[in-house]
Every structure is written in structure tokens, then in C-alpha cells.
Image: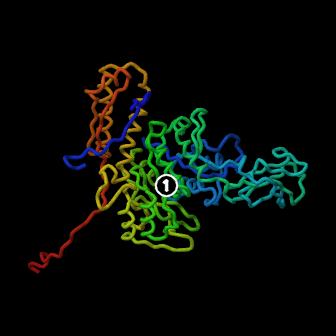
Amino acid sequence: MAKTYKHGTYGTLGQSVGRGADSVSGLPVYIGRLPVHLTASAGNKTNVPIVLHDLADALKQVGYSADWATFDLCEAIDAHFDNSTQNIGPIAVINVFDPTTMRTATDTTAPVPLVGGRGELADDRCILETCAVAGKVLGTDFTVTWHAGRQRVILQDLTGTMTSPVSLKYRKADPTMVTEALVIGTADDEHGVRTGVQAVAQVYQRTGLVPTMLCAPGWSNKQAVRTAMVGAAHAIDGHWYARVLTDIPTSADTIAAAKDWKNQKGYADPAEVTCWPMARKGSKLYHISTLSVVAAMQTDASNSGIPYQTASNAPVDIEGYHASAGKEANYTTTQANLLNAAGIRTVAFFGGRWALWGAHTAAFQSDGGTDPRDTYDSNIAMLYFILNWFQVNYGREVDAPIGRNRVDAIVNETRAYLDGLRAAGALMSADVAFEEIGSAGDLVRGEFTFHSTATPTPPIRAVTLNLGYSEAGLEGF
């Protein structure tokens, strides 16, 4: 078999190294639809990674609609930037909705009453740049903007010459034209063009940040999309390692059905955390995959950006379960544990608040057979963190001359970094060494291999107090 040509820094994830027979907190990336037609700023906003830092930034760059079922990534904007727990960012979004082609073929005409030269239109499908009024010039005689809070198009008469009601013509966006295939996307590497999930490979180049989590609320419960996400997350652009947050659809409306669905569809990758059902807060419905990304970022932020603590049992800003349309669900922690045992994350009311519940990867099997490495999502997060750190840290070494002293320095620098993680409680043990005995051909080709082992600190899954009655207090009474 021909040896793969390498040029750059690389990391590979090996199997668990056990005893005897025992076997860069970066950027989350969301893929889906956004109401970019409601923004005024120019530029391509389809199939390109866009970094959002806060709510104001999101409203300006990609817009916001309360219709999360249609514009699915607005859920992520709300969860990250408008929650009562802790707003957290940045996040990257890859919007697959293109309003330049996904629109109605004919104009819609709507009367807009004016009061003091200002009017409102309740239509989040209005493509702002297509708005027209007979005999008037957009931007000179009038403006149209989107008010995210009121969920209204605001028409402002700039000259005071418009007669109420104004007859406003515009084209409507049609986000229903987005298909699974468009979310999965394509990769035309000869021309450097990627779309959908495949555009994740361009996140580092465009943002300078390493993609570390992939999430597609409303789409990851479709097997083909999930397969594309898992495929994209393994060594993104040949380098970066990301975890994948997926959902089981609420059409599987019982615990048994959810477990069967997961098994039948093969949602069992070690890099994957699979979630069920959904959660609610008032009229808002959240995918638990989205809440998991938010909680993971909040947890990492409290740990200096080091992802050694699972997001399980982290508080989430919700009020309960949403199992399926029109049905109320009130699962106990005992029932939630049945999902955890099958490698499914959920939510639960525990410790006096609602929290994520489930620290395992989707590969976990409670009856045995799980590689120790794949037991907890924090294990994978830490190993990926180290691999990504190594590649970022030594990326500028590529193509520079290297001697034995520099090889030893890389070993010592990496060991010092791992020791720092161990001192912080993120690792229980770790070591690194240069491959002393290897193929001379590898060195001739300029390929230097370092080997490392690490034991991420495991979470406490259960704490039990055995309490017995004693008569000692009655002695001498």
C-alpha cells in the first residue's frame, strides 16, 4: 500500500493503553438555516463559516427569527446568547439557506399602515433587499429593517411623502427548499469550494480557530446528515479533532423506542454524544444537542478552557421535557439513567435545578465491551484537546530544520504541558517520547513521530453513603 504523503503537523488517536489485560477548547460549529435575508449587511452568507460573538453580533450578521422549526440555527443563537445561566461564545455557524435562489418566483404585495412615517409588517420571510414601493427608491425615500425583538419588518418613510397605507412589494424567502443533501454539502477541492457540513474543513482557515464540536439541531436526527457530521469530525482537513452532538427524533416517543432507534441507526461513534428527547422553556423547544454545546462551553470556561469536566449535571436554562408534539413527559432520574445506560444523554431535575444528564459517549455499553477511552465524553474531549494543542503549537515548526536538540526540546515542552494539565487535575497521568527506533525512510522524508499516553481524570458517576443504625448513642442514657 502506498504511504500517504504528509506535510504539516498531525495527531492520531490510538486505542486505550491499560494495565495488563485492561484494555484547545476551540470553536463549536453549527450547520443549518438562518434568516440571512433579514440582514442589511452585504456579502456572501451561505455555506461559509461565520463567527458570532454575542446577540448583537448575531442579529447584525445572520438575523434572527422566532420560527426555530424553519430557521433552526436561531435556536443556537438564543441558547448561547440569551439564557439566564451564562451567555457563552463565540460560535461558528454555517448557513445553508441561500435567499438569492431559494425564494418565491413572484412578488408579494402587502399594505403597510404608517403612523408618524413608520410602519410594521409581520413577515419573517420578507427578503429586505427586494422591497419596493412604486415611485420610491429604497435607501433614499424609505428604509426597511428587521426588528428581531418585535419580529417585524420596519418601514420608515425618510421624506414624509408616503401615503398610508404603503403598498409594499417584495419576494419571499423559501427555506423549505433546503434539503438533507444541501445540509450534507459537497466538496469541490479542485476549485476550493465546499458547502454544508463539508465546509467545516474551512473553519480554521477562515476563522483562525480550531473547530471542536459539530452540531446540527433539527438535522442530526437524519441518518445521512449524522454520518456526514461524524465523517467530517475525524481529522478535519487532515488535522483537527471535533466531537459531534446528535439527536434522536421525538418521533421515537418512549425510552424504549429511543434506545431501539439509536441501535438501529448506528449512532454509536466514540466522538459522538447522542441526545433525547427535547427540552422546553415556555413556548421554546430546545434540542439537547444544542444545550450540550452551551453547557460544555460554560463548563470549559470555568476550567480555564480545558475540557476535562463533562457537561453532565451542568445546569441548563429549561423548565422540563418535551418528548413529542402535544405530549407532556415527566421522567424521573431513575428513568433518565435508563437512557444513560444506553449511551444517550438527556436532562433531569437534580440538585434543585434542571441539568444535563449523561456523561457517556454514544459508544458506551453498560453491559461491557466499551473501550475505556470511549466511556466518558470528557475522555474524548481531553484527548482531542491534546492532539489539537500539539498541532497548533508546533505548526510553525513544519519545514524548519530540526536536530536532535530540537527533538528533545519538543519532548520536554510537551511533557511540561502535560504535567501542567495533570497538576490542574485534568489528567491523572501522561507522558511523551520520541520514536527512537523507526524507519530511516521516515526521517529522510522529514516525518518525525512522537508517542504519548494520557489518562484523563474520570468523572464521579455515583456517590453512595451506606448508613446503618447504631445503638451507641443510647449507652449510658
Mark 1, secondary structure of its residue: loop
> Residue 333, position in %: x, y?
38, 69
Q: Nearer the viewer, residue 386 or 140?
A: 386
Residue at (25%, 49%) from the top-left corner?
Answer: 23
Q: Residue at x 26, y 44 (%)?
A: 17
Q: Position of residue 241 (x, y in %)?
A: 43, 42
The residue under label 1 is: 86
In the rendered image, the quadrant that contains the N terminus is top left
- Residue under the point 21% across and 69% down: 466
- Compared across the picture, whether 448 is left or right of 355 comes to left
As rendered, which of 228 and 331 lies closer to the eye? 228
Query: Residue at 31% of width from left, 60% of height from top?
Result: 461
Question: Horizontal and vertical percent for residue 451?
Answer: 30, 34
The answer to whether residue 319 is seen in the rendering is no
Q: Is residue 442 left or right of residue 65?
A: left
Given the current orientation, which residue lies at the most extreme front position? 1
Badge 1 amino acid: Gln
Q: How is the image coloured?
A: rainbow
Residue 436 position within the rendered picture, expressed as x and y whole percent measured from the top left: 26, 27
From the viewer's perspective, is 424 left or right of 184? left
Residue 45 falls in which quadrant of the image?
top right
